């Protein structure tokens, strides 16, 4: 379980640090602002996750997480200098999808470890996946993506359900964690490719 969690955590941190930094650059923030958005997007969901299960956030207990995030911010700055406008570029879309899937998996595994109900596992998977990005959007004074793009949070929900089904039929937690990430990633990429949307009211 710890190996799968560590892998998904590093992937999510790196991916969301890149995404948050690129959002900051798109909003014409200065270097500090770009770094703040990168750090917040990467660490925000995990801090919410850990707070809900009553433990000191991992980001405040392990310097490795912060170093990975700063590496992601630095990489984003290199990408911005190299490619310029990246709003619809695969270099933004793909890391965002990967980060969403990876953090859904870490949220689900932490929920299971904390002894949460199936509903709690799914909620924690979703909040971990979308929490940092939502905080980033709020700082940029815009409606969070999760509230205006229906198939952004939905893959995280589905990933959480896949995790719960897997562990309930005695599949090892590490395998269930990877299955959660895989399901969320595939669904998110399919939604992007095919333009899926849920019906509006």
Image (cartoon, rainbow, N blue to C red):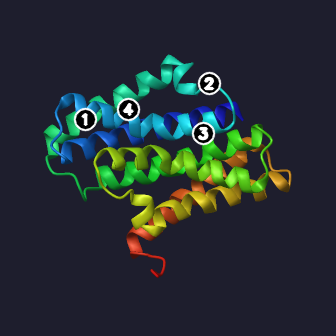
Which tag, 2 or 3, sits closer to the chain's start? 3
Name the spot of residue 140 as percent of width and height, x first.
28, 47
Q: How far, Cα to Cα, is label 4 from label 1?
A: 9 Å
Q: How far, Cα to Cα, is label 4 from label 2?
A: 18 Å
What element does badge 3 sit on? Answer: helix
Name the spot of residue 62 as percent of width and height, x first.
54, 19
Name the spot of residue 12 as percent of width and height, x first.
48, 40
Q: How far, Cα to Cα, is label 1 from label 3?
A: 24 Å
Q: Residue at x 67, y 55 (%)?
A: 122
What element does badge 1 sit on? Answer: helix
Front label number (2 vs 1): 2
Image disc number at residue 49: 3
**Placement of the N terminus among the 4 image quadrants:** top right
Image disc number at residue 34: 1
Q: Residue at x 40, y 75 (%)?
A: 194
Q: For residue 93, which quarter of the picture? A: bottom left
What element does badge 4 sit on? Answer: helix
Image disc number at residue 11: none
Which tag, 2 or 1, sits closer to the chain's start? 1
Q: How far, Cα to Cα, is label 2 from label 1?
A: 26 Å
CB under 8 Å between discs 2 and 1: no
CB under 8 Å between discs 4 and 1: no
Crowdedness near tag 3: few (<14), some (14–19) or many (≥20) residues, C-alpha within 10 Å: many
Which tag, 4 or 3, sits closer to the chain's start? 4
**What residue is pinned by disc 4?**
39
CB under 8 Å between discs 2 and 3: no
Using residue 9 as the reference point, say whether residue 87 is left or right of it.
left
Which tag, 4 or 1, sits closer to the chain's start? 1
Residue 21 lies, with reference to residue 140, above or below; the image says above
**What residue is pinned by disc 2?**
56
């Amino acid at each position: 379980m710890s190996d799968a969690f560590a892998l998904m955590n590093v992937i999510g941190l790196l991916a969301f640090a890149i995404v948050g930094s690129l959002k900051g650059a798109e909003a014409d923030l200065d270097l500090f602002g770009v770094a703040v958005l990168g750090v917040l997007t990467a660490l925000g969901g995990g801090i919410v996750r850990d707070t809900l299960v009553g433990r000191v956030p991992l980001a405040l207990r392990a310097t490795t997480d912060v170093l990975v995030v700063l590496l992601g911010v630095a990489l984003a700055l290199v990408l911005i200098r190299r490619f310029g406008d990246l709003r619809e570029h695969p270099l933004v879309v793909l890391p965002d999808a990967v980060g969403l899937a990876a953090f859904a998996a870490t949220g689900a595994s932490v929920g299971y470890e904390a002894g949460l109900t199936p509903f709690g596992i799914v909620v924690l998977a979703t909040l971990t996946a979308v929490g940092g990005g939502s905080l980033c959007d709020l700082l940029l004074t815009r409606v969070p993506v999760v509230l205006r793009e229906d198939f952004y949070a939905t893959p995280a929900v589905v990933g959480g359900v896949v995790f719960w089904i897997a562990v309930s039929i005695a599949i090892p937690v590490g395998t269930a964690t990877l299955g959660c990430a895989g399901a969320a990633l595939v669904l998110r990429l399919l939604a992007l490719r095919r333009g899926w949307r849920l019906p509006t009211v």
